Each structure stands twice: as structure tokens, then as C-alpha cells.
């Protein structure tokens, strides 16, 4: 039999054959089989228990398991952009205990796929991801930046801030991971990414979104979140522009303002999103832990000095707003009925358990702390935002699972 020499190419794999066509063909078939099985496993996200697929497993129902062998997914001092992330590093800001970093979310009926930074970067090649929302959304974006950071050599990445947008650019992959500050999604007087104050009077242009939305139009992945800034009984709605001398402000109930704003947002999605290109995710309400009596502490206590999760399965805090949750759910379901695919990333219940993982007093302080506050730290503890590494990493593991299913 004549001996031949040929190059067999299979999806970028090159194998030099000098043992005959038949053996080359067999080897090629074996490689194709391995590639197929690997991709099929990735696309189906084969889980540990019973190898359940994503569609048949409720990733949001489960419990926290202490795992100091494999968590956190990255170390604070290994995230090269941590200094740019607006003080979400509790360890860097003085928190000594690190137990909050070592909890793994365990769904009841399957295993949550472990985040693989290199696989995620490859999956996001030539793609633009935009997280849109408030500081909770920025928490999740900061977590994603750190999850990807260790997989990207320093010369290949950069961070750029431009107005309401801050971008992690991964040059070799032509990938952008962005956060866009828009706490109400629609226009408001709190749209500046730094110069805003939650406690000041809030004024919304509930019918106006284009100023923000024009920056999202060509995104491949949109991740929305809005909740924290709506936590007040009433807001002011502006009819006209902020600059107009004839502008009219009207005080309205929060749920009414939210209803109009969500309609503006959903109308924009319905008519402007490229349905064949853009994947849309909505992150559910992030719970707060500002009332310690909800988990058995005395009145006036909060998340300050908490070091353990809540272990009562199905625990619901007293700070939720069922009306707001229902309105968000109704809006998303209406969009689905109109043919727009939106996947909800339900972080609410799993985050309800984590009273131990907020930034508390371990964050960048934007205002001077008074002597009275220093004497009683719980008075200025932030029980809204989250430490990174921490709970937002699990939100991104959930997002990771759905992104691998979608593309």
C-alpha cells in the first residue's frame, strides 16, 4: 500500500498523517466526535446530578453550601481593576472576616455550572454586553469584570469611563463588557453616574428613554435591573424637558410612575431591539437587609456585623414590595407574549439568605462619617449593595449558564 502524507484539518486542529488515508480518516472521525460531544455538553450544560439540562432544572431554588476549597472564584488582589470598581471590595476596605466569600449556591435538582472565564471570553468574542441599571447592576458588572480579568493577559484589556458608560475592553477578542448608569431606565435627575443622591428629590421623565437607549441599540447582550431607586412612596414626574421654563412637575404614586416608565422601556425594546441578534436578560429584585428584626435580631439592628447566611429555607424579608415585583413580572410577561424573548435571572430568593454579604461599613464612603456614626457603625452600614467577591458572582454564574444556552 502506498504511504501518503497529508494534513487533516478539523476546526482549527492540524494533524499530520503519514500512515495512510484510512487511518487519517479514522483519526479525523474521532476528533470530530470529540468536538461534537464537547460542544454538545457545553451547549446543554450537562449538570452533575442526574445530568439535568438547563430547561428541566430550577437554578434559582436551592441552598448555600460552605465551600472554602473552590470559592471564591477569584481573589480580591488578583482582580487588576478592583480599584476602579467604586469601593465594592470589602476586603480591601478593611473587612477582616472572609467567610462570606466561601459560600456556593447549590440548586436542589442539579449543579450550577462553574464559571469558566476563558470559555466565557471565547463565547463573547466579537460581542458587546451592556449591564443597564443602578448600583446593584454595577455590582454585577464589577463581579463580571473580576471573573473575566484573570483569563485576560494585561496587554489585551483596558478600562474606559465615558459619561454614563464604563467599559472593560478585551481587545484581542473584540469584546466589550459595559455598565450604563440609568437607575430608573427612563430619564431622571439622577442620571449622572457620580453626581446623584438617593435621598434628594427624584424627578423622572417617564415617557423619555432615548437619551439612554441609543447607547444600547447595537448590544448583543442586554442585562437590565431596576428596583432600588423606586423604594419611596411618591416621585415627581416632569412634563417637558429639564431645561424648559414651562416645565410642569406632578407628584405621583410610585407604582403609577413605575407603570408608565416600564411601558416606555418595553415599547422601546419591542420596536428597536434586533430580535435575531440581541439576547435580553432581566435581573430580579436584589433584597436588602436593613431590618434585623426580620431574622430575629432586636429592632434597629441590620446587616452590620453579620457573618452567617440565613438558613431558613424560603425565608422572605420584610422589606420586599409585592406590588413592584408584580408590575415588573407583568411587564416582562407581556413582552414575551408579543414575541420578545426575555430571560429573568431570579436572584431574589437566593440573595434573601445572604444578610452577611453586604458592603456594610466596608466600602468607599462618599460623605464624611460623623463622630456619632463612628460611635454607632450600624447607622451608616450599607445593607443594599454587595461585597465583591461574593453574592454577585453567583448572579453571574446564573447568567453564564443562560448565555451558554443562548449562543
Image (cartoon, grey):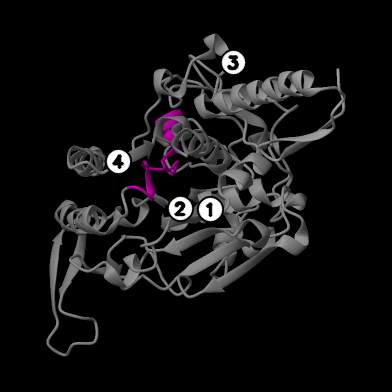
State the residue at coordinates (44%, 63%).
Answer: 180
- Which of pointers 3 and 1 lies earlier in the amino acid sequence? 3
- Give the residue at mark 3: 48
Task: Say left or right for 284 vs 403.
Answer: left
Task: Say left or right for 190 vs 251.
Answer: right
Task: Say left or right for 395 vs 30.
Answer: left
Q: Secondary structure at mark 3?
A: loop
Inter-mark Cα distance, 3 to 4 = 28 Å
For the residues labelled 3 and 1, say whether their Cβ atoms are less than 8 Å apart: no
- Whole-percent x and y of residue 154? 76, 60
- Whole-percent x and y of residue 217? 36, 62
- Whole-percent x and y of residue 235? 21, 63
- Give the residue at mark 4: 341
Q: Nearer the viewer, mark 3 or mark 1?
A: 3
Q: Secondary structure at mark 1?
A: helix
Inter-mark Cα distance, 2 to 1 = 6 Å
105 or 377, which lies in front?
A: 105
Amino acid at each position: 500500500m502506498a504511504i501518503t502524507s497529508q494534513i487533516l484539518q478539523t476546526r482549527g486542529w492540524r494533524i499530520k498523517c503519514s500512515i495512510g488515508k484510512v487511518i487519517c480518516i479514522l483519526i479525523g472521525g474521532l476528533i470530530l466526535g470529540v468536538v461534537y460531544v464537547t460542544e454538545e455538553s457545553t451547549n446543554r450544560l450537562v449538570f452533575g446530578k442526574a445530568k439535568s439540562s438547563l430547561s428541566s432544572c430550577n437554578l434559582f431554588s436551592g441552598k448555600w453550601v460552605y465551600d472554602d476549597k473552590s470559592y471564591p472564584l477569584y481573589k480580591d488582589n488578583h482582580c487588576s481593576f478592583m480599584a476602579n470598581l467604586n469601593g465594592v471590595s470589602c476586603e480591601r476596605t478593611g473587612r477582616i472576616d472572609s467567610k462570606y466569600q466561601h459560600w456556593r449556591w447549590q440548586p436542589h435538582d442539579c449543579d450550577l455550572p462553574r464559571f469558566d472565564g476563558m470559555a466565557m471570553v471565547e463565547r463573547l468574542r466579537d460581542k458587546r454586553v451592556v449591564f443597564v441599571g443602578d448600583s446593584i447592576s454595577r455590582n454585577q458588572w464589577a463581579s463580571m469584570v473580576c471573573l473575566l480579568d484573570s483569563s485576560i493577559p494585561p496587554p489585551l484589556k483596558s478600562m474606559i469611563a465615558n459619561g454614563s458608560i464604563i467599559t472593560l475592553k478585551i481587545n484581542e477578542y473584540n469584546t466589550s463588557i459595559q455598565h450604563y448608569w440609568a437607575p430608573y431606565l427612563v430619564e431622571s435627575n439622577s442620571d449622572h453616574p457620580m453626581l446623584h443622591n438617593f435621598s434628594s428629590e427624584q424627578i423622572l421623565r417617564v415617557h423619555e428613554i432615548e437619551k439612554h437607549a441609543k447607547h444600547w441599540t447595537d448590544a448583543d447582550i442586554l442585562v437590565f435591573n431596576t428596583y432600588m431607586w423606586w423604594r419611596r412612596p411618591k416621585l415627581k414626574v416632569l412634563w417637558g424637558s429639564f431645561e424648559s421654563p414651562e416645565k410642569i412637575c406632578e407628584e405621583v404614586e410610585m407604582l403609577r410612575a413605575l407603570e408608565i416608565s416600564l411601558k416606555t422601556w418595553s415599547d422601546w425594546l419591542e420596536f428597536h431591539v434586533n430580535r435575531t441578534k440581541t439576547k435580553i436578560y432581566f435581573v430580579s429584585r436584589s433584597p436588602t437587609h436593613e431590618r434585623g428584626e426580620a431574622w430575629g435580631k432586636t429592632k434597629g439592628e441590620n446587616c452590620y456585623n453579620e457573618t452567617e447566611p440565613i438558613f431558613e429555607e424560603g425565608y422572605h424579608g420584610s422589606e420586599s414590595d409585592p406590588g413592584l415585583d408584580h408590575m415588573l413580572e407583568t411587564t416582562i410577561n407581556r413582552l414575551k407574549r408579543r414575541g420578545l424573548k426575555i430571560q429573568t435571572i431570579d436572584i431574589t430568593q437566593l440573595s434573601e439568605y445572604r444578610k452577611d454579604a453586604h458592603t456594610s461599613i466596608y466600602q468607599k464612603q462618599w460623605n464624611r462619617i460623623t463622630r456619632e456614626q463612628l460611635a454607632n457603625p450600624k447607622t451608616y452600614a450599607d445593607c443594599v449593595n454587595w461585597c465583591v467577591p461574593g453574592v454577585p458572582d453567583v448572579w453571574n454564574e446564573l447568567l453564564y449558564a443562560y448565555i451558554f444556552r443562548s449562543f
